[in-house]
Amino acid sequence: MRYIKKGEAPKFFNDEVSTLKSWDEVSSEFKRELTKHILENEQNSLCGYCEAKIRDVAKTHLEHVVAKHKDLEKFTFDYSNIIVSCDGICFQEQQGFTCGHRKDTKGFKPDKRFLNPTKTDNIRKYFKYTPAGLIGASTFGKDRATHTLKVLNLDSPNNYLPEERKKSLQRFQKSVKEKSEKSGKSKQFIIKHLLSKENFAFISFLRFMYKDILNE
Ligand SMILES: [Zn+2]
């Protein structure tokens, strides 16, 4: 997971929500506009939890990190509490879904241990990966990381994520090779440059795989 630096709420957001009382009143046009705004400006078009690349806005949802609740109305229209999550439905029938929808499933409620990606600027330190694409808790805050992975179902070895992480690494390696050959620059230089843009699918996994080059 990567830290999501929330910006100021855009004007269209403030204008719209000033007239609303509940999330149910939010129009689908507004949701689409807000989703695009957040993906482009804050999330580099990556799911806020699993970091899958979002290619179709229709397959996402606006996710309240602190769940909306009658007693917590202030969080419903708190821009800093809203991120974009993928719909996480791959292999749903067999394995249960991931990310935002999973988080709202009974029995998987986040609590104080849950790592909020908008509030935890060193969130990457909590996780480690294997070359096979599996994610786990690092020794840094193991309890919170393990809890967060379970709440979001990001660490199941049976869902689509390990395979997708591996594919992303293969695409990245291909891209590095091509760019290095074309420009004559070293692979190391290209790797650092591409990873600094933070817009590749599963960017935290990629950065972990190249942590020696990045000195992380
Ligand atoms: Zn996701």
Image: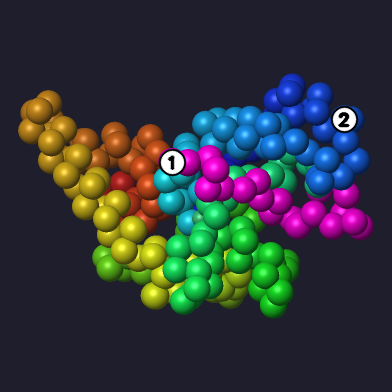
Question: Would residue 80 appear left or right of 143 to someone viewing this image?
Answer: right
Amino acid under disc 2: Ser
Give the spatial CA distance, label 2 vs label 1: 30 Å
Dot 1 amino acid type: Arg
Splitting the image into 4 quarters, where does residue 90 fall? bottom left
Residue in the foreground of this view, choosing between 108 and 160: 160
Comparing 123 with 17, the one in front is 17
Identify the residue shown where x is 27% and y is 65%: 131
Tell me, yes or no, whether the highlighted magenta stretch contains residue 69. Answer: yes
Residue 136 placement, left or right of 33? left
Residue 68 in magenta?
Answer: yes
Give residue 9's position: percent from left, percent from top.
72, 30
Please give the name of the residue rendered at 8% of the width and 33% of the height, measured from the top-left corner: 181
Can residue 128 be seen here? The reply is: no
Give whichever of 16, 214 is nearer the camera.
16
Q: Mark 1 points at which residue?
A: 55
Q: Where is residue 56 in the image (x, y as percent from the top left)?
A: 47, 41
Residue 37 spot, x, y in % from top left: 60, 30
Q: Using the rendered image of the protein, determine whether residue 24 is visible from the camera's viewpoint.
A: yes
Stretch of the chain drawn in magenta: 55-75
Can you tell which quarter of the image residue 123 is in? Answer: bottom right
Q: Tell whether 74 sits left or right of 193.
A: right
Q: Which residue is drawn at 83% across and 40% down?
A: 25
Q: Name the residue under label 2.
A: 18
Label 1 within 8 A of ligand 1 by Cβ: no
Judged from the image, the secondary structure of the residue bearing numbered disc 2 is: loop
Q: In which quarter of the image is residue 195?
A: top left
Instruction: From this view, report whether residue 91 is shown above or below residue 120.
Output: below
* Marks 2 and 1 in Cβ contact (< 8 Å): no
Q: In this view, does 142 lie above or below 46?
A: below
Whichever of labels 2 and 1 marks the residue nearer the N terminus, that label is: 2
Residue 28: give its label: none
